[in-house]
């Protein structure tokens, strides 16, 4: 039996520890290897951060399961307690010294998103949430915005590893641009979710995300009063499949028209 408050506390301290490793690369040349192509990179830091996070969590919870981006550590997502880890979300930013990346740890208990921690070590911002207990930024409760979409910024991702989706991305961007204050491309999907969760932006959308790109951010957003859907308007898949996403407070999703005016029906892959 896992106590979610205690698990969350552990995840928060692991995220802070991993953040130190990410920041320690600040001045250094970071060599990057290609995964599927020249855009999809992995660095020694992605591996080191993941190994550190797994080791620290295993030391505390020896029977927990893991579903991680690097190196195929992908256990059963319906396990009693599974940690979903993206060691560096925003690897392209990281490899280019953009100082806009985070460590993301989600936790599902018996298939239910239960705890989440996302840490941006450059801004020293730790977002966290536990199911039913609300979401926080550096310990202070956060909430999505009440403002109409036209008074908010819209975050988007380019699904850079799926170029076949570029046309859809930019069609949607062109469609939404006149309906909001402006658009932003941050380069880290988990930070995008958190940015909406704390009310700094009104909406986030992207055409392809993996589970580790949204497992933590989705819970933080929901606990902050927001919602996240596939572009078909269905719940995001929690079984390891990739999906597109539109996320924000309900009124911004509705005002965006994305679920009404685009009919993508093939977006869980
Ligand atoms: C990527 C980032 C990026 C998003 C991509 C993700 P990675 O994750 O979140 O913002 O556009 O879809 O894959 O590869 O840097 O961990
Ligand atoms: Ca990622
Ligand atoms: Ca990553």
Image: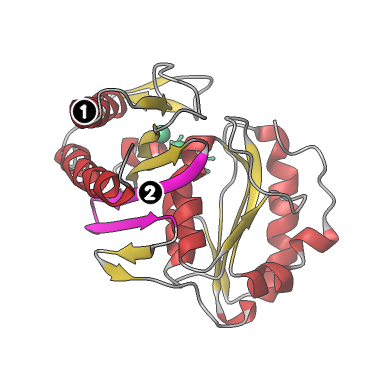
Q: In the picture provided, is 105 more to the left or to the right than 192?
A: left
Point out the image quarter for the N terminus.
Answer: top left
255 or 9, nearer to the observer? 9
Cα separation between marks 2 and 1: 17 Å
Residue under the image location 58 percent in, 77 percent down: 181
Can you identify the residue that label 1 sits on?
52
Q: Secondary structure at mark 2?
A: strand
For the rendered model, the colour scheme is secondary structure
Image-quarter location of ligand 3? top left
| Residue picked out by circle 2 | 116
Residue 24 in view in this figure = yes
Cβ atoms under marks 2 and 1 closer than 8 Å = no
Who comes first in sequence, dot 2 or dot 1? 1
The majority secondary structure of the magenta stretch comes to strand
- Check residue 125 for magenta coloring: yes
Q: Nearer the viewer, residue 90 or 17?
A: 17
Q: Secondary structure at mark 1?
A: helix
Q: In the image, what residue occupies the spot 38% across and 71% down? A: 142
Question: How many residues crowd mark 1 within 10 Å: few (<14), some (14–19), many (20+)?
Answer: some
Instruction: Decide: is 186 above or below 84.
Output: below
Residue occupying image coordinates x 85% and y 51%: 263
| Disc 1 CB within 8 Å of nearest ligand 3 atom | no
The image shows residue 269, relative to residue 205, as above or below, that is above
Residue 11 placement (x, y as % from top left): 27, 43
Q: How far from the left and from the top, in percent, is residue 37?
A: 53, 21
Q: Nearer the viewer, residue 149 or 76?
A: 76
Q: Quadrant of residue 20?
A: top left
């Amino acid at each position: 039996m896992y106590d979610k408050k205690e698990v969350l506390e552990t995840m928060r301290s692991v995220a802070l520890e991993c953040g130190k490793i990410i920041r320690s690369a600040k001045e250094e040349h970071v060599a990057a290897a290609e995964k599927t192509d020249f855009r999809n990179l992995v660095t020694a830091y992605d591996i080191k951060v993941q190994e550190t996070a797994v080791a620290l969590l295993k030391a505390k919870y020896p029977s927990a399961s893991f579903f991680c981006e690097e190196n195929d550590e992908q256990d059963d997502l319906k396990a009693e307690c599974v940690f979903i880890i993206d060691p560096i979300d925003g690897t392209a930013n990281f490899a280019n010294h953009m100082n806009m990346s985070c460590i993301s740890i989600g936790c599902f208990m018996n298939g239910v998103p239960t705890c989440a921690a996302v840490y941006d070590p450059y801004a020293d911002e730790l977002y966290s949430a536990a199911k039913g207990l609300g979401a926080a930024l550096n310990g202070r409760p956060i909430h999505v915005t009440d403002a109409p979409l036209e008074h908010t910024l819209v975050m988007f991702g380019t699904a850079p590893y799926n170029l076949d989706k570029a046309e859809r991305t930019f069609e949607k961007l062109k469609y939404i641009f006149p309906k909001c204050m402006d658009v932003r491309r941050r380069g880290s999907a988990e930070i995008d979710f958190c940015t909406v969760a704390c009310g700094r932006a009104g909406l986030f959308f992207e055409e392809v995300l993996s589970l580790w790109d949204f497992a933590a951010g989705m819970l933080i957003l929901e606990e902050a009063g927001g919602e996240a859907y596939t572009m078909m308007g269905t719940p995001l898949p929690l079984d390891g499949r990739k999906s597109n996403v539109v996320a924000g407070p309900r009124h911004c999703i509705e005002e965006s028209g994305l679920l009404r005016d685009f009919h993508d029906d093939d977006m869980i892959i």
